[in-house]
Image (spheres, rainbow, N blue to C red):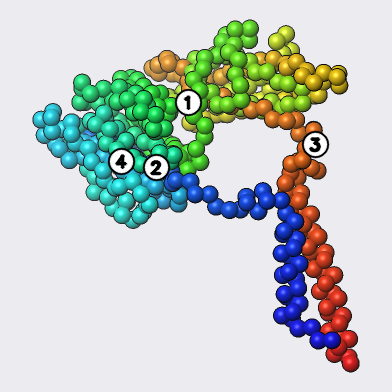
Amino acid sequence: MIISRRSAAALCGLLTTLAVGLLPPAAIAADEPTENPAPKVDLVLDVSGSMRARDIDGGSRMAAAKQAFNEVLDAVPQEVELGIRTLGANYPGKDTKVGCKDTEQLYPVGPLDRTEAKTAVATLAPTGWTPIGPALLGAADDLEGDGDATRRIVLITDGEDTCAPLDPCEVAREIAAKGIHLTIDTLGLVPDDKTRRQLTCIAEATGGTYTSVRHTDELSGRVKQLVDRAADPVVTPVATEGAARCADAPRVRPGLYSDREKFSEHRWYRVDVRPGQELRASVSVAADRAVDRDYGVLLRAVTTHGREIVRGSEAGDGRTDVISSGLRYPKPEADGLDDENPPAETVCLQVSNAFSAPDSVKTTPGLPVELSVGLVDSPDEPSDIAAFGLGRGWWLLGAMVLTGLLAGLLWGWISRLRVVWRTN
């Protein structure tokens, strides 16, 4: 009997096809690409005359911005469509009407040509006014289309708007009111109090973030984070306000929540956990201004009677944008088997921070807080998608093992027949 290599390969291929056919549809569909609209980001850069100031790492603010932009452009994820808009880049005169229209799209929002974008940024020189409001309106127009796409404006400026009465904070509120899911993040270069308040207001109006920047690496690092966030968006946080004690705390459900916490303050939130569920919570506190060295964040879960269940903490020593901690609490199943709806346990979540600030730094408003709350089936309970701790991957692993075993047996049988044929 003659069995060729081609026939053997065909038999192995048929066997593999049959084995793959045993896989659940979800395991195959998981590898199919999805056709989601590309996330879009518009970087809005202040090129006003004040960007000449030399107070960032021994160089000018403009030089720091250019260096940061070059680093950011090298790291933009491939799936992100990015554009660049300027404000105050062209008109050096004193005519308010002209200066307050000085905003233009330097690089259109779309697939990124890194060389072209870097060349465009390299030509910029500090020139004119600071029309933040008109620039935000222009950036919103830059990001029009693809209603389901993630859209983000990242504003980098060293001063407050100089084109009143068009209030950029009101502009941000108008953009948010349109319901187009556009987020504005703001970064202040060596900001004063007025600039900080205005940029914080702009960011909060659209659910964005404000960051104070005093070094080049801080600027490039934060912009990279924001661009990456557009590529991998998170759920928009729901504004809430924690209480000074658990009894008065708001009751939160699974989701993402935003709050503000004073320096060295603690706040409480409540969540109901049913038997057989696992509570998974995490908290992030952002240092959006200069802070002292040595800081930390604590997240505790306690009963309504004050007994601690579990805690998570994290400490730092140096300058960071965000510090985070988390915890997990699996609640055992109820002892009574006859009770189909056992009562939930109220768990109190305490968020505390150990930040302090120099005397020259304003401590109000408080530090931005993001609290994530999740409730899942306890991992101790078996389920049809978590058998043997491998989830749906168990079926794939089993199919691969079976395929390998049968293919090995088949190939051994074919090899023995070939040996017999040759000896005869």
Under tag 2, what secondary structure? loop
Decide if residue 255 is on the left or right side of residue 415: left
Per the model, the C-alpha gap separating discs 3 and 2 is: 41 Å
Q: Image quadrant of residue 57?
A: top left
Per the model, the C-alpha gap separating discs 3 and 1 is: 41 Å
Residue behind mark 4:
142
Q: Are marks 3 and 2 in contact (CB under 8 Å)?
A: no
Compare marks 3 and 1 and give the one earlier in the sequence: 1
Q: Residue 312: where, in percent of width, then height?
A: 66, 25
Residue 246 visible in the snapshot: yes
Under tag 4, what secondary structure? helix
Amino acid type, callout 1? Ala
Quarter holding the N terminus is bottom right
Amino acid type, callout 4? Asp
Q: Image quadrant of residue 288?
A: top left
Quarter holding the C terminus is bottom right
Q: Residue 235: where, in percent of width, then height?
A: 52, 32
Neighbour tally class for label 4: few under 14, some 14-19, many 20 plus, Cα within 10 Å? many
Q: Are marks 3 and 1 in contact (CB under 8 Å)?
A: no
Residue behind mark 3:
382
Could you tell me which residue is drawn at 76 percent across and 51 percent down?
A: 395
